[in-house]
Image (cartoon, rainbow, N blue to C red):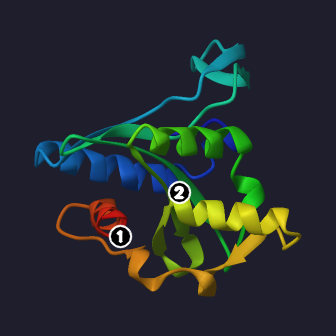
Amino acid sequence: MATWNSRGLRGSTLEDMINYTNEYYREKKLALVQKIPTPITPVKIDKDSSQITLAYFEKDSTVDYIGSVQGIPICFDAKECAKDTFSMQNIHEHQYNFMREFEEQQGISFLIIYFTHRNSFYYMKCSELKKYIDRIEEGHPRNFKYEELDSRYFLKGKNGALVHYLEGIQLDLAERE
């Protein structure tokens, strides 16, 4: 269980649910997706508990997860939001650039946004993310609202998949054809 009191562990509840889903997908041979650890350098370690109490990030991370779904490369990042307005400051330029370049290599990249107060998961395609980034460059606010999102991309749990993002991928692929 994550205990490090840092910004780096925000969203660990969502990540736990995604990790559980990824294990379910692996067992069912539907997908093989792994969490990418954020590289850190420990500065202080509590000798009694062997826990890191102070550390710094070595470099910018890319996305939280990377893998393959039935031979299709995927990558995605997991974000949590506690209200109906999602701040685009939660998306870092290097993350978006990685996702965009991943798509250029014929992969699928997306965000899973968990609106905690609604217990609602959203699959955001990279192309939709680009729309909001472009909108900021046109002078619009640095956020988007829950009501703006495409209702078809809200994810429901199914069987053993708590965050059933394969359905989002399936819809995403159908729209690309």
Mark 2: few, some, or many residues within 10 Å (few <14, many ≥20)?
some
Label at residue 65: none
Classify residue 113 by image quadrant. bottom right
Mark 1: few, some, or many residues within 10 Å (few <14, many ≥20)?
few
Which comes sooner in the sequence, label 2 or label 1?
A: 2
Of circles 2 and 1, the one toward us is 1
Residue 30 locus on image (x, y percent): 16, 49
Q: In this figure, which residue is indicated by the disc labeled 2? A: 126
Residue 35 locus on image (x, y percent): 42, 36
Using the image as rendered, state which of residue 110 and residue 19 is in the foreground: 110
Residue closest to the far left: 28
- Could you tell me the amino acid type at mark 2? Cys
12 over 4 or under it: above or below: below
Using the image as rendered, state which of residue 4 and residue 26 is in the foreground: 26
49 relative to 176 in the view: left or right: right
Q: In this figure, which residue is indicated by the disc labeled 1? A: 175
Residue 38 visible in the picture: yes
Residue at left offset 63%, top offset 46%: 96
175 over 98 or under it: above or below: below
Residue at left offset 42%, top offset 75%: 153
